[in-house]
């Protein structure tokens, strides 16, 4: 396979991707995306939108998803370090409601592929982080959904010392629980 190493995760469909880095005394070079390499790894879709955000330490974004226009996402950190999480919301999946987390950083250069059907969020661990991601569908602001970041049924082990130090948008602490999601979508 080309210039990437792909690790499968405990939850089917999630993949951690490490690009090959070519470094010398000047710095380094790496391909962050090659359709050919990703197709060879079984990640075959068209990305239509790239996004980038900047956040300070303690910012927690998520857990988000698009309801009617779901997105595959390929996420990475350009600067700093984050703890990135995906929660399986695929109806009928044997891992429905389970989560997987991975530390992404500018240093480790890892990327995280999150297919449609997952809620996604991250916590900034460094003083500052820039987070970049490719999406397979456009963002539709009226289509946004979410799950509460600290839902006890999911039980994400976020790496923070004091919840009062977390910084969130106004909407993120107000999302419903996984139980609410199951009721809304008729999931057993």
Image: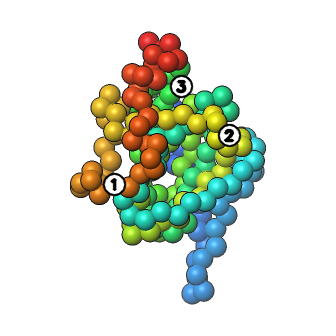
In the image, which disc is placed on residue 3? none
Q: Secondary structure at mark 3?
A: loop
Few, some or many C-alpha atoms within 10 Å of disc 1 (few <14, some 14-19, many ≥20)?
some
Q: Earlier in the sequence, mark 3 or mark 1?
A: 3
Q: For this view, does 1 lie left or right of residue 101?
A: right
* Residue 181 visible (yes or no): yes
Q: Which residue is mark 3?
A: 90
Looking at the picture, tell me which residue is in the foreground, 35 or 54.
Answer: 54
Disc 2/disc 1 C-alpha distance (Å): 26 Å
Q: Earlier in the sequence, mark 2 or mark 1?
A: 2
Q: Which residue is mark 2?
A: 140
Q: Which residue is mark 1?
A: 166
Nearer the camera: disc 2 or disc 3? 2
Q: Position of residue 179 (x, y in %)?
A: 39, 22
Disc 2/disc 3 C-alpha distance (Å): 20 Å
Residue depicted at 67% across the width and 43% down the height: 139
Few, some or many C-alpha atoms within 10 Å of disc 3 (few <14, some 14-19, many ≥20)?
some
Nearer the camera: disc 3 or disc 1? 1
Q: Position of residue 94 (x, y in %)?
A: 46, 21
């Amino acid at each position: 396979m080309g210039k990437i190493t792909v690790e499968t995760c405990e939850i089917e469909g999630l993949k951690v991707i490490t690009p090959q880095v070519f470094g010398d005394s000047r710095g380094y070079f790496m391909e962050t995306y090659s359709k050919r390499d990703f197709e060879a790894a079984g990640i075959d879709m068209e990305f239509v939108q790239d996004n980038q955000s900047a956040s300070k330490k303690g910012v927690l974004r998520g857990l988000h998803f698009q309801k009617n226009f779901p997105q595959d996402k390929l996420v990475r950190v350009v600067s700093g370090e984050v703890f990135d999480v995906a929660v399986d919301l695929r109806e009928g999946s044997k891992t429905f409601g389970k989560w997987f987390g991975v530390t992404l950083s500018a240093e480790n250069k890892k990327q995280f592929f999150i297919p449609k059907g997952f809620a996604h969020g991250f916590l900034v661990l460094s003083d500052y982080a820039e987070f970049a991601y490719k999406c397979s569908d456009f963002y539709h602001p009226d289509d946004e959904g979410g799950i509460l970041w600290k839902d006890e049924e999911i039980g994400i082990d976020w790496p923070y010392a004091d919840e009062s130090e977390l910084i969130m948008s106004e909407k993120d602490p107000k999302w419903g629980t996984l139980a609410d999601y199951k009721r809304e979508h008729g999931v057993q």
